[in-house]
Image: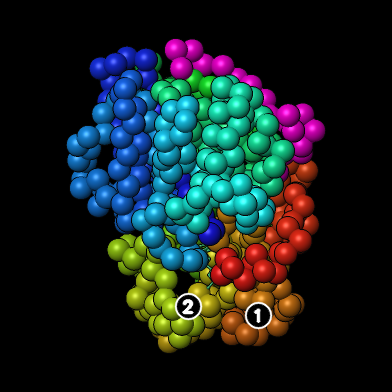
Amino acid sequence: MKDKCGIVGAYSNSKSVEVSRQIYYALYALQHRGQESAGISTYNGKDMSTYRGMGLVCDVFSNGNFDGLDGNKGIGHVRYSTTGKSLIENSQPFIREFDSGTIAIAHNGDIINSMELRSELELEGREFCSTTDSEVICHLLTREYSQTQDMIKAMQNISHDLIGSYSLVILINGDLMVVRDPMGIKPLALGKKDDLIMVASETVAFDVIGAQKIRDVEPGEIILINSEMKSFSLPEKSNAPRSHCMFEYVYFARPDSILDGKNVYDVRLNIGKALYREHSVEADAVMPVPDSAITAAIGYSRESGLPYGEGLIKNRYIGRTFIMPTQEDRETSVRLKMNPIKSELEGKRIILVDDSIVRGTTSRALVNVLREAGVSEIHLRIGCPPIISPCYYGIAMATKKELVASDKKVKEIEKMLGVDSLGYLSIESLIKCIGLEKSHLCTGCLTGEYPTSLPKNIEEYEANRC
Ligand code: AMP
């Protein structure tokens, strides 16, 4: 099961504070990270309560109905898996009663050796009720906790076994434990509003409730929050290189978030500017593929002096979950999502800016739409360098053979898409645009060189995912 998710944790020492509402708003702000299911678990000093459902945050919680979700500590989750069955059992937080209490876990990331870990746990006689990595982590953690009666030791002990990415919020017997994998592949930030401590995948979750960001959770850090807040380290923290996902900056995160000290909006403006410097061409206007490429197109326009325009209007009521079963349906769906403004396009030479090309389906269909609307030239500029290899750490992309750039050169893709020219941002420029050191970024999908070992059965693993 491949998850791209958003997580939230909230803790107040004041018994009168109900955190469910704050978590709800925070999840609302993280809705772009997952639209398949949403859930909240809270603890009121005595009992843990959980509510999970399929669909958008506002539908699952009927526009703010939190009946039964009482307590001053809690966690929340939004989930989006583009693969496998969309099942309520796989929604999160994942909760379990065990011999030493009750635990609720919400996870963003992908444990790439979870199939092996699960088989080992099953051999020990442990039963599973979902196909998520979170349940695997839950079994490992509760097994260790039952032996050590120490949550930090338990987490430190199991981290040796976990290969992949994990940002976690864990509610256990009234304590909130926050963990970020040693390489910090997925984002996670710490915030505060009065006596309320919050953690969230992105800082937009703090903005919505008026909380202030304190700092990012460090790669390899464990934070235990109860009557006080203490920081601990995973054993791998000191020797693991940081490896933040570059695709969060390019596409996945909201532009108004700040990830690991970098403003996503600025990164995308830089990407647009760099695209102009690397691939300039004469044209009449710069236009984005909305919404994800808007900021980069503004950057291109500012750097080139060419006017920014809107040639395509997006139907805002089609979410990222709108996934069609066949290639033909996927092509038709683009027309449902995007409609051209003929008067802005007729006879024009346009620079069309998009954030990324994965399979190439979207770009090809958009090119047809734009040609029918009468553009004279299309110069496609892509903010993400060619994606040549799958992501194993939580961005649901495609299998290697579906990735159009995995076996085609830029000129071949240009021809296949039917554009007058195609320019991808280079990896070196992208790294400069993000502003982090090259060695601190995961560029596995661009280079095929990954920050962790991969499972031996990677082909089987890939087949199961997609
Ligand atoms: P395609 O090339 O047809 O596979 O689609 C690429 C477009 O889908 C990009 O321009 C993005 O806006 C969007 N996109 C990229 N990665 C993902 C993803 N992991 N999940 C959903 N949409 C994505």
**Residue 245 part of the magenta-drawn span:** yes
Q: Nearer the viewer, residue 189 or 78?
A: 78
Camera-nearest residue between 237 and 170: 170
User: Which region of the structure is painted magenta?
Assistant: 226-248
Image quadrant where residue 315 sits:
bottom left
Eyeballing the image, is 360 above or below 13?
A: below
Residue 125, above or below 12 = below
Q: Position of residue 401 (x, y in %)?
A: 67, 76
Q: How many marks?
A: 2
Residue receiving disc 1: 414
Q: Quote the CA–CA distance across marks 2 and 1.
A: 13 Å
Q: For the point 72% across and 64% down, which residue is it?
A: 457
Quarter of image, res 152: top right
Q: Earlier in the sequence, mark 2 or mark 1?
A: 2
Residue 248 in view here:
no
Q: Quadrant of the C terminus?
A: bottom right
**Picture coordinates of residue 4, whole percent (x, y):** 51, 53
Where is residue 106 shown, x and y percent of the image? 47, 41
